[in-house]
Amino acid sequence: MLVFYDAPVSGNTYKVRLLLKQLAVPHRAERLDIVGGAVRAKEFRRVNPFGRVPYIVDGEFQLGESNAILLYLARGSRLLPSGVQDQALVQQWMFFEQNQVELSIGLPRAWKHFSIQQPEAVFEHYRPRAESALRVLERHLADRQWFVGTGYSVADIALFAYTQMAPEAGHDLAQFPAVKAWLDRVRAQPGWFALE
């Protein structure tokens, strides 16, 4: 059976948790306390040399990085388009999510959420990047329902995880009505649940 190494507070593990539920993938979850340092423990490092979550073990196959896991688990499902160009677009948005959205929204949100002291200049460094990323999402969603094609996909799951956290990172989503409407559409998908 697939083993999924999870951490409830992580947006990256939330993506995998959501996909596993929405596709009803049989698995066993191993929850780790990342705040308490469980990912740095020798026992976990023997399983996963990256020392990060999410991580899956599927028989002899092991895989890290949230978006790689999403692509692996979604193959052949309704959540991954079959066309080569649509798959490339899905990957484009997933790379954008990790490089722009997760970095500029996820880090400041984590610092605030866990009361990790940072100089105000650090938050000000990420603020324009986050706002720029949100503007890109807003423009793209202005005339479409989903990020790729005509249906909900792993691109939407990937982007949703940290975009929904923008208010926790200090961003008012009222100025991004298309993004807000898309967040509501994602929340309306069968099997959706909130981040813990």
Image (tube, grey):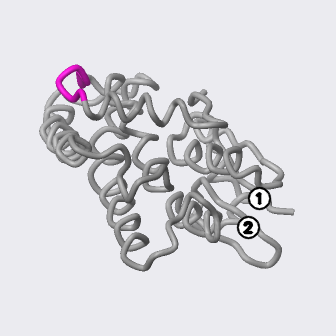
Q: Quadrant of residue 90?
A: bottom left
- Secondary structure, mark 2, is helix
Q: Quadrant of residue 46?
A: bottom right
Q: Which mark is residue 1?
A: none
Asked if 130 appears above or below 174 in the picture, the reply is below
Q: Quadrant of residue 121?
A: top left
155 drawn magenta: no
| Nearer to us in this view, 129 or 78 | 78
Answer left or right for 155 relative to 173: right
Residue 15 position in % (x across, y down): 55, 47
Answer left or right for 163 relative to 60: left
Q: Which mark is residue 46?
A: 2
The residue type indicated by label 2 comes to Arg
The range drawn in magenta is 171-177
The residue to which callout 1 is attached is 43
Residue 83 position in % (x across, y down): 45, 76
Residue 53 position in % (x across, y down): 60, 53
Q: Quadrant of the C terminus?
A: top right
| Nearer to us in this view, 83 or 35 | 83
The residue type indicated by label 1 comes to Glu
Asked if 64 appears above or below 169 in the picture, the reply is below
| Nearer to us in this view, 172 or 137 | 137
Q: Residues within 10 Å of mark 1 (few under 14, many from 20)?
A: few
174 drawn magenta: yes
| Nearer to us in this view, 147 or 162 | 147
Q: Residues within 10 Å of mark 2 (few under 14, many from 20)?
A: few
Asked if 150 appears above or below 21 in the picture, the reply is below
Q: Please name the residue shown 63% across and 50% down the image.
A: 19
Spatial CA distance of label 2 from label 1 is: 5 Å
CB atoms at circles 2 and 1 under 8 Å apart? yes
- Secondary structure, mark 1, is helix
